[in-house]
Amino acid sequence: MKAQPKASHFVNGEWMEDTAGAPIEVIYPGTGEVIARLHAGTPAVIEAAIAGAHAAQGAWGAMRPVERSRILMRAVALIRERAEELAQLETLDTGKPIQETRAADWPSGADALEYFAGLAPTITGETIPLGGDFAYTIREPLGVCAGIGAWNYPSQIACWKAAPALSLGNAMVFKPSEVTPLGALKLAEIFIEAGMPAGIFNVVQGFGAVGAALATDSRIAKVSLTGSVPTGRKVYAAAAAGMKHVTMELGGKSPLIVFEDADIESAIGAAMLGNFYSSGQICSNGTRVFVQKGIKARFLSRLAERTAAIVAGDPLDDSVQFGPLVSAAQHEKVMGYIARAQAEGARLVAGGAAGNQGPLFVQPTVFADVTDEMTLAREEVFGPVMAVLDFETEEEVIARANGTEFGLAAGVFTADLARGHRVIARLQAGTCWINAYNLTPVEMPFGAVKASGVGRENSRAAVEHYTQVKAVYVGTGPVDSPY
Ligand code: NAD
């Protein structure tokens, strides 16, 4: 199996290679075999990308918004035409089941491009009457934005960052995760095919050092990172030194609260989706499932039954629902968390071992009787490990749900809608669901509070994060000066 791109980078509308860069081996997590060999960006590649983006952005930003949108819409059409090829590549890059990559990854990326292509031409400034004189505002692009991606949704992340940035007149230098470098290159190619000028969307591969070089360059106006909280702290600090705008989409340990009156099958289905989809490698997962005591036994027995029926196997097989983890490092980390949960006294209800379908599989795993102090309730695992915690009262569960530095997402299952709204109002999280979980349509803002991040992706909210306001005062009479 091979998925070797023409070169490692895509800069100024062309493939670019510099074999002096550190080697990057891309594996297919389904089997562990190497499917591509790339190189990290060297200073020369990074310089070409930033300088190219900087040179191209002015004319792009000055273009009529509908003209930019027309190009983005052509890219959307190309993505949809090539849906199957792109899904296959995403599965090779990430190891996620083809069922998922057909439904979620590029389709969600195309939605974002379509949404912002429609929205951008409607973005205008305002006029402010001042009794004769007046002021007006212009919503301007920021300039060149750096996008730095995580490995769990590599193509979706590239699209979610490119869509608002480009539609609103910015250029972008995007650095994919070194673990999953392939999808973003396809996006760069598709944009050029759709008629986008060279230099507007550039892809430079690399490890953290390449991301750091982008975050500290004075020509970069904004850094949008999707990654872990520790990386977020570093990138935010680096960006602050240059007074840059930031969007930080970071990790979580989100609560999913199931009250006794909930539709229990739906709640179990949501908890499974929110812990096992993408083998649990989703930032907004509801990894602390709080179940009210009265339904605990029923919840756990049905959950164990349904978990045992999950079909794990070769991600390229149409019937497979559950794939491997993305890398050996992630596999080791997740197995370590499972061992620690057992050592700290959590009760294993399902899974708990490596899977036998390939070297990187971990069984979908459920622990019950998890307490707030256990490592499993405090740290992001980023794997298929669900922690079930018991609770008795609404007041208690709200306090416990909020007892974390994270604040990405939260969910509540209850038949009592008044309670659903009441509880959500008090949960410290940026993205919430009532009687649903992990649905992230582009129309809805996505983002976090507390240590899980700042800024919002998707929806109208993203416009604030990819533009800046210029205010212009217009004098209409003689200047009244005391001098
Ligand atoms: P990571 O933090 O290890 O890496 C993220 C990206 O940052 C990578 O491209 C990496 O090369 C780069 N990077 C690392 N150090 C850097 C530095 N000093 N300066 C600049 N860039 C640097 O995260 P990961 O392991 O790739 O992804 C998993 C994490 O991402 C999880 O914590 C997950 O919750 C989070 N995530 C968040 C969201 C969200 O939208 N909130 C979405 C997906 C993933």
Image: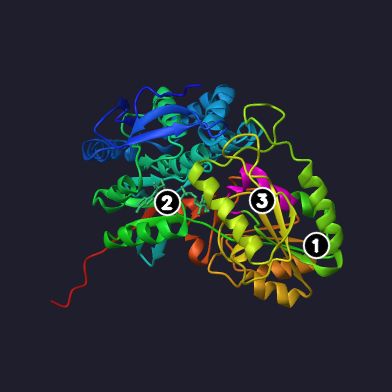
User: Which residue is depicted at the point 64% across and 67% down?
Assistant: 344
Query: Circle 2 sits in a helix, a strand or a loop, which is it?
Result: strand
Give the CA distance from mark 3 to mark 2: 23 Å
User: Which residue is depicted at the point 52% across and 31% down?
Assistant: 28
Q: Is residue 469 above or below residue 174?
A: below
Of the residues under marks 3 and 2, which one precedes in the sequence?
Answer: 2
| Residue on which disc 1 sits | 414
Magenta highlight: main SS = helix
Q: Residue furthest left?
A: 483
**x then y, percent, for residue 76:** 52, 30
Q: Verify whether residue 174 appears in magenta.
A: no
The residue stretch that appears in magenta? 270-284
Q: Nearer the viewer, mark 1 or mark 3?
A: 3
Q: Is residue 339 left or right of residue 256?
A: left
Query: Circle 3 sits in a helix, a strand or a loop, which is it?
Result: helix
What amino acid is at disc 3? Asn
User: Which residue is depicted at the point 71% across and 72% down?
Assistant: 397
Q: Residues within 10 Å of mark 1 (few under 14, many from 20)?
A: many
Q: Residues within 10 Å of mark 2 (few under 14, many from 20)?
A: many
Of the residues under marks 2 and 1, which one precedes in the sequence?
Answer: 2
Query: Circle 1 sits in a helix, a strand or a loop, which is it?
Result: loop
Q: Verify whether residue 280 appears in magenta.
A: yes
| Residue on which disc 2 sits | 225
Give the CA distance from mark 1 to mark 3: 19 Å
Between 421 and 275, the one lying in front of the other is 275
Of the residues under marks 1 and 3, which one precedes in the sequence?
Answer: 3
What amino acid is at disc 2? Leu
Residue 283 in view in this figure: no
| Residue on which disc 3 sits | 275
